[in-house]
Image (spheres, rainbow, N blue to C red):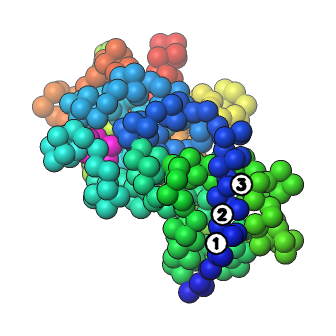
Amino acid sequence: MITITIDPARQRKLRSAVLKWYDQHGRRLPWRTSADPYRIWLSEIMLQQTTVAAVVPYFERFTAKFPDVRSLAAAHVDDVLRLWEGLGYYSRARNLHKAALLIQQNHDGVFPADAQLLQALPGIGRYTAGAIASFAFAQPAPIVEANTERLYARLIALSADVRSTASQRTLWDFATTIVPKNRPGDFNQALMDIGSQICRPQEPDCERCPLNSCCAAFALGQQRELPHRKPRVPITAVDEICVVIRRRDRYLLRRRENGERWAGMWDFVRFEVEASELEHLPITTPQTARTSQRSLLTAPQSPLPDKIRCQVQAQIGATVGDVVAAMEFRYSVTRYRVCLKSFLCDGTLAANEIADGTQWFNSAELAELPLSKTGRRVVEWLTNRVT
């Protein structure tokens, strides 16, 4: 483990520079207008793996619908997921709802101020607990997230892989050392702003950085090389099949189970297939050029291949009719690049033939269901296609 020491004079200089910069340049964001722990918690959960620009409209809609922890706890989880739709990483929304219920039940709807108590809530780790404790309750709690991790690593010229256990311990120790008792929330938010706006992953703007005189990497000319990380995992191509089963004006969907991607949300029958299975699909030439979304030509009254029909039956407990229309689009999830081919099939299923966890919905009901972003694109295709 690397031990980092910082002398009192450098510590005072760093703290002063950070707060002075924040007073002049700190971002004005909707969740920074008050010290409400609910709004701070919500924003921090939304900002995980998501940009500020993407979060702002979701935050404003969410707080308009659920202005406090009590209203969130009283909501049905489907309403929470529907409002979260498109933001991704839906376990965040489920954990928000679970945590709101626990705060209501165990703390009478009042947010705990203690970082250890906060970490006992679903979805709140050490960073989020530190953010809430410092932003809402003015406690000198340290934070380490993507932007401050990079900033700290450059300030101390950390040459080891920043994601290693030893490096993380070093960075947390450094964060604990520098956070002041005076204005700890502003200090931590300033560090995140400096990290995102100035101490960028590529091309850090060191000349404009208020901490360049305190930065070991800048002094060594290593700011572009640091921090070190393990190489990224290669991109993996994936093919998926989505089967939309229609009966008159209703569509069959299944609720995703715990442990599945998009758990708790509704989805059409969907599964991954091997590339070799695509050769047997009832598709001819595309009607449009290869873009992010295109219609696919199908032969009249074409059945799905037997293997795919069996997979559909395994999910919903019934067979399906021939293909009526087809479409494909591409999307990304972490390191996966997915090509999703969707097939609309007419079905003649009786109500008692479908499996548990599946249900028929009409078009109006589909508009209100919590769906993944890709599921919503399939619904839009169904709505817009000419029947």
Could you tell me the amino acid type at mark 1?
A: Pro
Residue position marked by numbered label 1 in the rendering: 8
Residue position marked by numbered label 2 in the rendering: 12
Q: Could one spot residue 358 in this view of the protein?
A: no
Image quarter of the N terminus: bottom right
In this rendered view, identify the residue nearer to me: 198 or 22: 22
Residue position marked by numbered label 3 in the rendering: 17
In this rendered view, identify the residue nearer to me: 308 or 216: 216
> Which disc is residue 62 wearing?
none
Could you tell me the amino acid type at mark 3?
A: Ala
Q: Are marks 1 and 3 in contact (CB under 8 Å)?
A: no
Q: Earlier in the sequence, mark 1 or mark 3?
A: 1
Magenta-drawn segment: 95-100
Instruction: Select label 1 or label 3 by which is in front.
Output: 1
Q: Is residue 372 magenta?
A: no
Image point (32%, 47%), residue name? 95
Say whether residue 117 is left or right of residue 2.
Answer: left
SS at circle 2: helix
Compared with 150, 327 (above or below) is: above
SS at circle 3: helix
Q: Residue furthest left?
A: 352
Q: Quadrant of residue 98?
A: top left
Q: Is residue 98 magenta?
A: yes
Say whether residue 367 is left or right of residue 73.
Answer: right
Q: CA distance from mark 1 to mark 3?
A: 14 Å
Could you tell me the amino acid type at mark 2?
A: Arg
Instruction: Count numbered badges in the picture.
Output: 3
In this rendered view, identify the residue nearer to me: 383 or 229: 229
